[in-house]
Image: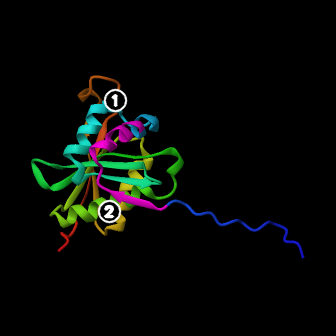
Amino acid sequence: MTPVLPRATPTTSPSIDFREPTKADGIRLWEIARDSSVLDVNSSYAYVLWCRDFARTSIVAVADDRVTSFVTGYIRPESPTTLFVWQVAVDADQRGKGLAGSMLGQLVSTARSRGVTHLETTISPDNGASIALFTALARRTGTGIERRDLFDTNDFPDAHEPEHLYTIGPFSVAP
């Protein structure tokens, strides 16, 4: 008997590792942001500096020894229990695999062990994917999410959209 459909040949997908970025990853973060066609792209210097100074509050996903995705964040100086997530980016060929949510979950878990109780991020009103990503994070962590206006279009020197502040928390602090 000949099967109507050929059997699928199992493929092995590369394992994904999460880690803190290193200074050497800064170039790759800049490339991913640039290629996203969605993110505000900062200078290459900013990404290299970010990977040096804010590595403990950021995360990268690595497949086959190549950074494919990142989340950049920092602890707010005025609120040392708040992690602010600045950018989330996933290479086009890695999208749809849940990497953004996994990286955020890992980053929050690590941050909770350091005393973080809240996460903040800004999202423009038309970015439904980011709104869904952070809403799902709040749901997975069993906490609330609130939105308020933060930056109006007049706060920017260019044609930037407004940015709403989303606050997720409180998280219980991990022992």
Q: Which residues are magenta?
A: 15-31
Q: Nearer the viewer's eye, disc 1 or disc 2?
A: 2
Q: Position of residue 170 (x, y in %)?
A: 21, 64
Q: Position of residue 75 (x, y in %)?
A: 17, 51
Is 100 on the left or on the right of 117, as rendered? right
Q: How is the image coloured?
A: rainbow
Q: Is residue 141 magenta?
A: no
**24, 141: nearer the viewer:** 24
Q: Which residue is mark 2?
A: 106
Where, by quadrant of the figure, is residue 87 drawn?
A: top left
Residue 160 disc label = 1
| Tag count | 2
Taking the spot 31% from the left edge, 42% from the top edge, the residue there is 24
Q: Amino acid at mark 1?
A: His
Q: Position of residue 107 (x, y in %)?
A: 29, 59
SS under mark 1: loop
Q: Amino acid at mark 2?
A: Gln
Q: CA distance from mark 1 to mark 2?
A: 30 Å
